[in-house]
Image (tube, helix red, strand yellow):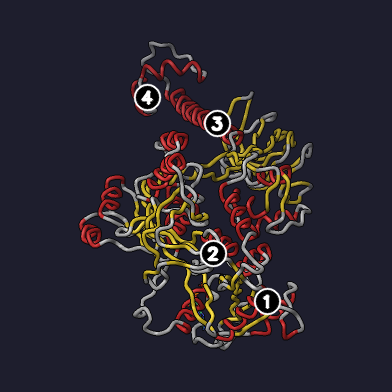
């Protein structure tokens, strides 16, 4: 056969063919023009085998680089800061795992710790490592801890005794999702508000007040979703009394236990509202039994836990429930001094287009008045107006009253403490610096990372990777904070989420323009499209998702993040087999006697046939036999018979280097 023709059949050039032939064992000379047909056939076989070996070598090299990279990333684990002592709850939050999993994990390892129990750094760092983090000890308390501490300190100093005057109890409704918190809060509002007082329109300011038996009760109106856990906890700190709502058709559920933990941690008196008694499958006794099982014995069973069966939907027994709330409040004698310098806690905060920064404060002590100068966390202002929850202007607010305040320089954080205080110039200057930073965040122009240089750098590095760009708008600062915190947890190693803009209020024209230019998705929680934006959205191709359910937003983001994840097959090394005897040699099925040089070798493993340390071919083990019995694994030193496919041409002393293949997210 002509050498040029042979080269064509082998899809190479004549020059390359002549150059490579000696390495395949054919010495036909560099000037050869023709070769014998039988030699040509042998060259073809050897060429195909050579090409196959080359491919295997390249694959091996690729696998080696991948496993080195894997080792590198493993050693560069994500670091988290953990103090000398940390509660189980806080650790779960840092590791972004469900606290119930963590409690279960600790139990399995012999540590019985509840939600609020502290574990030491050593234990926490072992747990962190198992979850893929590297624990680094830190000294600093975090910001929210400081606020918790401040709130507790403030609560303790509330005036009692002679100077204290009776004040309305502050009540929080807690319980599992869908057990009826929102319905109950609505029912209470409807039952006890004098019709027509506010034209039927009420404002959502984070709390409202109702009258029962000529006495006021303040209700905290916090959203009930899982992502608002932090806010619920703050509710627990702010409140005097809790209503624990349990659906009679569902019983005690994870968030019921979580709420009980908050109630017990804060030492709150509470009343259990057994809800949905109108349902045919309601079982009040089942709820009472479950309560008794955790030492909350119902009153009518001889215990101390007050239970009121209600139907929030039908407005049944709502007044009885409120009477019980007043009863437990009377036992505690909630008082405060309206004459003292005023202070309070921020329970809601946002920027209003017309009114600027607005916040709801729950007055704790003293009387807050229009014209008062106030300092709240990093912001300050002079109160221009006070509005009650019905939206009516009031001149002053006494303890336990929720009021919306206008006149602040920027929106404070939920949980911040308000103090009536005249501030000097130096203090004002210092605060101004801070509020500018916060303003930027609340006024929609910041990135998700609040301007930290390190983070910007990290963002740049991530730019080349997979990135989901989003714009997030929410109705209130508390919801926005909770949503952003949940979104950040959805990031994956190689998929980042860039929050190009986050802010309060409706989705505007500029949000859509930004999203369009940056190919970002716009998410709105409890907001709408502004009129202008509504017109634009028809013309533009911006993906907008608006929802009142936080899960829906998170689910959508998670789905998009997952779509970026690519799967790569990686090799996991198993042991080696030494070929002792070849009984049958065929590509479809060979039968070989082997010795296990190195374990493990499992059935269905892939193998690379190695001869003189060179890879020859690749195949798969389809059966392992020991003493004529099929086995799943062969242990080290054992002799066994194997059936393989995909390779022929085995020789004694060959090594089958075994491996399995796994999928890995890249
Ligand atoms: P939340 O998640 O705890 O705020 O629960 P919701 O107040 O949103 O209530 C969840 C669902 O239970 C809604 O469909 C309500 O209509 C329903 N629901 C609430 N209270 C009752 C009740 O007393 N009886 C019945 N049958 N359904 C109720």
Residue at 53% in and 28% down: 61
Residue bearing mark 1: 331
Looking at the image, is mark 1 or mark 3 earlier in the sequence? 3
Q: Quadrant of the N terminus?
A: top left
Residue bearing mark 4: 12
- Label 1 neighbour load within 10 Å: few <14, some 14-19, many 20+: few
SS class, disc 4? loop
Tell me if 543 is positioned left or right of 404 in this view: left
Q: Nearer the viewer, mark 1 or mark 4?
A: 1
Looking at the image, is mark 2 or mark 3 earlier in the sequence? 3
Q: Nearer the viewer, mark 4 or mark 3?
A: 3
Q: Pick whichever, 490 or 336, lies toward us.
A: 336
Q: Nearer the viewer, mark 2 or mark 3?
A: 2
> Disc 3, ligand 1: is the CB inside 8 Å?
no
* Numbered label attached to residue 339: 2
Residue 299 in sight: yes
- Label 2 neighbour load within 10 Å: few <14, some 14-19, many 20+: some
């Amino acid at each position: 056969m002509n050498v040029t023709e042979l080269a064509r059949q082998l899809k190479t050039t004549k020059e390359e063919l002549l150059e490579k032939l000696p390495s395949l064992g054919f010495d036909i000379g560099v000037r050869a023009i023709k070769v014998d047909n039988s030699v040509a056939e042998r060259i073809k076989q050897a060429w195909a085998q050579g090409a196959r070996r080359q491919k295997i070598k390249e694959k091996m090299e690729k696998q080696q680089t991948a496993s080195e990279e894997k080792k590198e990333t493993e050693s560069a684990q994500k670091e988290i800061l953990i103090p000398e002592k940390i509660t189980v709850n806080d650790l779960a939050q840092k590791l972004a795992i469900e606290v119930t999993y963590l409690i279960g994990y600790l139990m399995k390892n012999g540590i019985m710790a509840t939600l609020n129990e502290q574990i030491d750094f050593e234990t926490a760092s072992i747990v962190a490592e198992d979850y893929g983090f590297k624990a680094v000890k830190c000294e600093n308390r975090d910001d929210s801890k400081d606020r918790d501490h401040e709130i507790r300190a403030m609560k303790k100093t509330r005036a009692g005794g002679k100077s204290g005057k009776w004040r309305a109890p502050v009540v929080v409704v807690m319980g599992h999702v869908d057990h009826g918190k929102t319905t109950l809060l609505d029912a209470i509002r409807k039952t006890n508000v004098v019709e027509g007082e506010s034209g039927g329109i009420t404002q959502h300011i984070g709390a409202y007040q109702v009258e029962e038996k000529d006495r006021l009760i303040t209700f905290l109106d916090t959203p009930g979703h899982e992502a608002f856990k932090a806010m619920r906890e703050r509710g627990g700190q702010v409140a005097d009394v809790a209503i624990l709502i349990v659906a009679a058709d569902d019983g005690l559920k994870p968030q019921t236990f979580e709420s009980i933990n908050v109630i017990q941690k804060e030492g709150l008196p509470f009343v259990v509202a057994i809800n949905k008694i109108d349902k045919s499958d309601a079982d009040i006794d089942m709820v009472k039994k479950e309560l008794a099982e955790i030492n909350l014995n119902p009153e009518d069973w001889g215990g101390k836990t007050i239970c009121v069966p209600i139907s929030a939907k039908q407005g049944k027994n709502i007044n009885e429930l409120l009477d019980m709330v007043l009863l437990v409040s009377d036992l505690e004698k909630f008082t405060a001094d309206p004459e003292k310098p005023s202070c309070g806690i921020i329970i809601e905060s946002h920027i209003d287009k017309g009114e600027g920064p607005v916040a709801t404060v729950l007055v704790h002590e003293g009387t807050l008045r229009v014209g008062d100068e106030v300092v709240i966390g990093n912001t300050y202002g002079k109160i221009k107006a006070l509005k009650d929850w019905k939206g009516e202007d009031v001149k002053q607010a006494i303890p336990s009253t929720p009021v919306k305040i206008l006149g602040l320089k920027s929106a404070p954080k939920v949980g911040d403490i308000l103090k009536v205080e005249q501030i000097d110039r130096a203090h004002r200057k210092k605060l101004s610096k801070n509020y500018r930073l916060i303003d930027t965040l609340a006024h929609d122009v910041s990135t998700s990372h609040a301007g930290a240089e390190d983070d910007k750098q990290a963002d740049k590095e991530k730019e080349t990777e997979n990135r989901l760009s989003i714009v997030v708008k929410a109705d209130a600062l508390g919801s926005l904070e909770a949503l952003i915190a949940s979104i950040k947890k959805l990031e994956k190693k190689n998929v980042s989420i860039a929050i190009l803009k986050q802010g309060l209020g409706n989705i505007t024209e500029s949000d859509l323009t930004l999203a369009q230019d940056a190919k970002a998705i716009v998410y709105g929680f409890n907001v709408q499209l502004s009129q202008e934006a509504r017109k634009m959205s028809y013309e533009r191709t911006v993906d907008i998702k608006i929802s009142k359910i936080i899960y829906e937003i998170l689910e959508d983001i998670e789905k998009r993040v997952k779509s970026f994840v690519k799967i790569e097959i990686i090799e996991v090394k198993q042991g080696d087999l030494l070929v002792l005897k070849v009984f049958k040699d065929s590509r479809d099925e060979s039968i070989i006697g082997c010795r296990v040089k190195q374990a493990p070798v499992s059935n269905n493993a892939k193998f690379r046939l190695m001869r003189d340390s060179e890879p020859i071919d690749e195949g798969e083990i389809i059966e392992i036999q020991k003493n004529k019995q099929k086995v799943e694994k062969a242990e080290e030193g054992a002799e066994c018979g194997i059936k393989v496919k995909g390779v022929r041409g085995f020789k004694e002393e060959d090594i089958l280097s075994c491996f399995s293949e796994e999928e890995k997210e890249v």
